[in-house]
Image: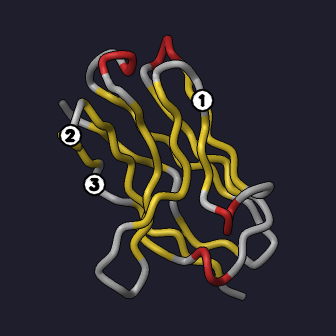
Amino acid sequence: VQLVESGGGLVQPGGSLRLSCAASRNIFDFNDMGWYRQGSGPERDLVASINVGGTTKYADSVKGRFTISRDNAKNTIYLQMNSLKPEDTAVYYCGARILRRYTWGQGSQVTVSS
């Protein structure tokens, strides 16, 4: 299984970016998929997830600003990020879970700075 991410970059505070994650297999094979981010520390924290039934979950820090969605026909999930803040700066990883096993994308740098 491969997850290929795209869409990171540099944006000013208040701006928007959209991340994409294309899977090499049917996304309904996964229990859930999501976006995680890793800042300066070692932890990779959940940003948003969507399960096979379509239920979404968000970190409190991004609620109302970020939206996770999927395109079933393209086996792709997205993360629309609006009203970006400097503290959103991190490497963002797409993750896909089957039971306890995670597959990760290559990571996308998102930098929010003026």
Q: Secondary structure at mark 1?
A: loop
Identify which amino acid the numbered label 3 is placed on. Answer: Gln
Residue marked by disc 2: 100
Q: Earlier in the sequence, mark 2 or mark 3?
A: 2
The quarter of the displayed image where residue 4 is located: top left
The N terminus is located in which quarter?
top left
Q: Which one is in front, 26 or 100?
A: 100
* Marks 2 and 1 close (CB-CB < 8 Å): no
The picture places residue 106, in percent across and down from the top left corner, at: 27, 54
Cα separation between marks 2 and 3: 20 Å
Q: Secondary structure at mark 3?
A: loop
Q: Quadrant of the C terminus?
A: bottom right
Pair 2/3: label in front: 2
Relative to 82, is 86 above or below? below
How far apart are the two marked residues, 2 and 1, measured between alpha carbons?
Answer: 19 Å
Q: Which residue is mark 3?
A: 106
* Numbered mark located on residue 55 in the image: 1
Query: Image quarter for residue 82?
Result: bottom right
Q: Front-most of 26 and 9?
A: 26
Work out whether 13 lies above or below 76.
below
Classify 10 Å Cα crowding around label 1: few (below 14), some (14-19), many (20 and above): few
Residue 20 shown left or right of residue 26 in the figure: right
